[in-house]
Image (tube, rainbow, N blue to C red):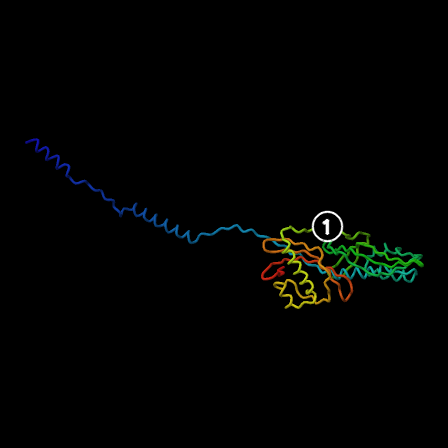
Amino acid sequence: MNFIKRKNKEIKAKTKKLKVYKVNTHKKTVIALWMLLIASFCFAVYKNFTAINIKTVYETKVIDKEIVDTHKIENFIKNFAQDYYTWQPSQISIDSRNEAIKKYLTNELQTLNVDTIRRDIPTSSTVQNVEIWSVKQDGEKQFQVVFTVDQIIVDGQNKENVSSAYEVKVYVDGFENMVIIKNPTICSIPSKSSYEPKAKGSNGTLDAATTGEINEFLKTFFKLYPTATEKELSYYVKDNVLKPIGKDYVLAELLNPIYTKKENQIEVSVSVKYLDQQTKATQISQFDLVLEKENNWVIIK
């Protein structure tokens, strides 16, 4: 009997309800945590919409060079050279020259040039041509000018053509008045360069039939070209890359045509020999063209 009672007690103990602890959602700490979470979310959304996209900007400063009109300087020097390099073997001519060059030279240079043409000089000089080779700014208001003078020098019965190159410096004031501050000084001018461009050569990618086609096309075109109208050229030339020239030239021959194939295009370098019917001279023009075959060959560049 006691055993049965003990068993009943054990069963009742097992079937007792477990205690449930509820969190009070209205406590101040919980409210504070919820407010912090909501505030953090709102702040994240705000930052997403107002974020600044930072980019590195590289600025290039362009300095515009002032374009200086040198025509006045060139004319000033040409007039000076005419007076400076012209003389006759007479005192009147020499005095007239000395007076004339005062319009161009500083007082110091006038004194320096008093005896450049002596009273007993045996020659006379006439200026044929003055050519300006360069005008370079040399300081804020100074310009370096290189020029050549072609003279006819007469000495008794002898006459000689003389060409010389000189350099002067010109000062230009705020009112664009000018004065030469450096006496004509002998110098050199550019001469022929020894440069030779690399010779072109065909790359051997054209067969004989294609080469023959292009030769015939070029002969036909260049025979027509000097007198062709724009409409006539349109059959041979695309997008007006060559325009009418209206010249009375007769085709003589094509010289040294060189063909280079690049994909579906042919690059042509050729010299064309014409006879000019007006001057009776031979005219040789050099052309660099690009051909392409549509229905027929056509010049596209």
Residue 293 falls in which quadrant of the image?
Answer: bottom right
Q: Is residue 10 above or below residue 36?
A: above
Looking at the rendering, in which quadrant would you find the C terminus?
Answer: bottom right
Q: Is residue 24 above or below residue 246?
A: above
- As helix, strand or loop, the secondary structure at mark 1 comes to loop
Work out whether residue 204 or residue 122 is closer to the camera in this orientation and state it. Answer: 204
Work out whether residue 234 or residue 184 is closer to the camera in this orientation and state it. Answer: 234
Q: What residue is drawn where x is 57% and y is 52%?
A: 59
94 left or right, relative to 190:
right
Q: What residue is drawn where x is 60% and y is 56%?
A: 265
Work out whether residue 72 or residue 110 is closer to the camera in this orientation and state it. Answer: 72
| Percent of width and height locating residue 171 | 76, 57
Looking at the rendering, in which quadrant would you find the N terminus?
Answer: top left
Location of mark 1 (residue):
196
73 left or right, relative to 87:
left
| Percent of width and height locating residue 268 | 66, 56
- At label 1, the amino acid type is Glu
Single out the residue that lies furthest toward the left: 1
